[in-house]
Image (cartoon, rainbow, N blue to C red):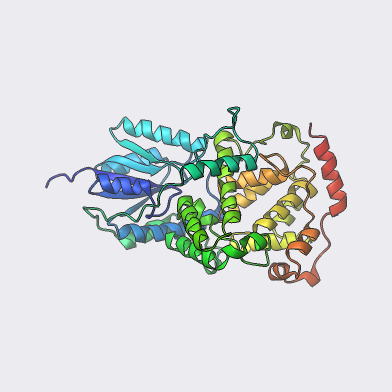
Amino acid sequence: MSTPSPAALIWFRRDLRVGDHPALTAALESHERVIAVFVLDEPSLRPIGGASRWWVHGALDSLAEDLAELGIPLELRTGDPVDALHTLAAEQNANRVYATARPGAAEAELDARVHTELGSHGIEVHFAAPDLLVDPGLRTGEGRPYTVFTPFWKRALDELARRPPRAVLPVPQPARTPTAVNSAAFAAALDHLELRPTSPNWAENWDTYWSPGEAGAHERLADFLDEDLGDYPDLRDRPDRSVTSRLSPHLVWGEITVSTIWHAVDEHRRTHPGQGASFLSELGWREFAHYQLFHFPKLATDPWRPSFANFPWPEADPELLRAWQTGTTGIDLVDAGMNELWQTGTMHNRVRMVVASLLTKNLLQHWRAGEEWFWDTLVDADPAANPFNWQWVAGSGADAAPYFRIFNPELQAKKFDPNREYIRRWVPDTGLRTAPIVDLKASREAALEAYRKRE
């Protein structure tokens, strides 16, 4: 029996799709046979949280079906990617690996090691560009990284006007030499990863809120453009109104590309003048978060502003943190948000700012405690956006809210949930509520005093 021609491995990470996938397209154009692989919990990177694990299970299940239609099996591995890729390459007689690069210093270091060590075994590694709208290497006229969103986004829009995001690639043609796919074996391997909770199954109702996978991403985008984009500028801050895109977890796991969204919104604007700019600006904040991670790799652990290195954070208070985590602070809008998070894996963006402000300012708990909780409980926990947003609220981040900006949850509720619909949905027992765990006025003054002393 003759040895089959060398195959290619397509290494999936945060790009769990088959459409608009430059690395997958390149692999199929260059090789008759392609094998896909996903490696869980790469040791050199931050382990994903419980909510993300739930999402990845559904995303991988969907991806495996889409790949099967292309004659590509999806292998699941754990551990060091170098070892996993080298072993699979030997098993499949593969001489190339294709993957999509990811922003972040730890990710770049890992990719460099993969390139070097697999190269020493005669295996070529090719990385497609990360899923960003603009080059994170953009600099100001003085040659420094941008630190404020508005000038960054103005420059980004100028760049995009000159060079729009790349054209969206179609789903590639099937492999010229398809490989038989054993669906039952894949299902067993996926279950073996134990990505979804069982005892207790705290996510048992999440399937009613989410549809992980590429098909779910495109359906969500279509619904958003048809139903919500026109109301987005005026109502996006209203947690009682469902007009946000809910695309963030799909973007985090690359089930849809930012280029696809950009072009879809741009096409929509041609027949709906005046719509879309506000939403595209929110995509700009995603870009800015990844831009900051590129230039400040320790975004999840260290304050972006050096002056906050000496901030007098009190000793962590487990009781305060637990009340915040469980939605039992006695402050309606905060508890509604934390209950929404626990029951659905998400929280409205306006409410995220309110609950983060309460934790870091009124309760004076370190922003890292909140960032770590969100990392574990959000289906859209993003390595860049999650720490970026927490540092923004805490006042220690790039273009951060001024330290003296402390969200008053009672005023925020009156303004953005005027009929208390959101609160009644997520805190139905308001008549039995206990007193707030903190006096908002007194704790605000204490926070301001602490922030004044941070120098």
In this picture, is 449 found above or below 437?
A: above
Residue at the extreme top = 142
The image position of residue 25, as x and y in percent, is 32, 49
Please report the residue visible at 60 percent of the width from the left and 35 percent of the height from the top. 298
In this picture, is 215 found above or below 439?
A: below
Task: From the viewer's perspective, tell me whether residue 124 is left or right of residue 136.
Answer: left
Residue 318 seen in the current view: no
In this picture, is 199 found above or below 389?
A: below
| Viewer-proximal residue among 302 and 413 | 413
The image position of residue 124, as x and y in percent, is 31, 35
Task: From the viewer's perspective, tell me whether residue 125 is left or right of residue 281.
Answer: left
Task: From the viewer's perspective, tell me whether residue 26 is left or right of residue 240.
Answer: left
Please report the residue visible at 56 percent of the width from the left and 63 percent of the height from the top. 203
Q: Quadrant of residue 206?
A: bottom right
The image position of residue 244, as x and y in percent, is 60, 61
In this picture, is 29 found above or below 224?
A: above
| Viewer-proximal residue among 165 and 89 | 165
The image position of residue 268, as x and y in percent, is 50, 61
Task: From the viewer's perspective, tell me whether residue 290 is left or right of residue 236.
Answer: left
